[in-house]
Amino acid sequence: MARRIYAVDTENALVVAALLQDSIIRLSDIRHLPKSRQLVVSGSRLDRSHKHPMRQNFLLRVFDVERVRGRGFEKHGYGVLLAMEVGDDDRELWCRFAGGGDLCVSIAALRLQLSDHDQPWLAKALPSHEAST
């Protein structure tokens, strides 16, 4: 089912984070738009709400962006989003990727919009998360 979700507080952002876990995102599909103070991210998220897991194209907009910092990414690669977290003061949004890449988005206020696009398709592979010891 196509979704459109707005998040303006930590509780709503946790819903968005859960929906985006295990998303596949090409680094070239992460765009910081300083003039409009937005970060726009597109990719495919894993949707387990179907009988068989599906992939769904999405667009995430982060509003009121003041600064974007990244580290640990290969220049032309892609990442699998492991977690999205909101900082203690709701002024930072952290995206943590498999392989150690991090994206830190400094924001004036917490405002996100997640929207699904196109038709979902059957997921060819499922991520495996090994328990840490």
Image (spheres, grey):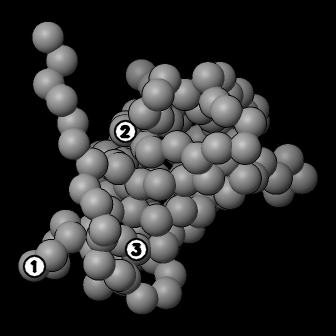
Which type of secondary structure does the marked residue at label 3 adopt? strand
Looking at the image, is mark 3 or mark 1 earlier in the sequence?
A: 1
* Amino acid type at mark 1: Lys
In the rendered image, which residue does mark 2 sit on?
82
Instruction: Identify whether 4 is placed above or below 59.
Output: below
Identify the residue at image location x=15%, y=76%. 52
Query: Mark 2 belongs to which amino acid?
Result: Leu
- With respect to residue 131, does 120 lie above or below? below
**In the image, is 123 to the left or to the right of 92?**
left
Q: CA distance from mark 3 to mark 2?
A: 17 Å
Q: Residue furthest right?
A: 35
Give the residue at mark 3: 56
Dot 1 crowding, Cα within 10 Å, few <14, some 14–19, many 20+: few
Which label belongs to residue 39? none
Please report contact status of discs 3 and 1: CB closer than 8 Å, yes or no: no
Where disc 1 sits, the SS reads: loop
Q: Earlier in the sequence, mark 2 or mark 1?
A: 1
Quadrant showing the N terminus: bottom left
Which residue occupies the extreme front position in the image? Answer: 124
Q: Check disc 3: other Cα within 10 Å, few if <14, some if 14-19, many if 20+.
A: many
- Going from N to C along the chain, the mark reached first, 3 or 2, is 3
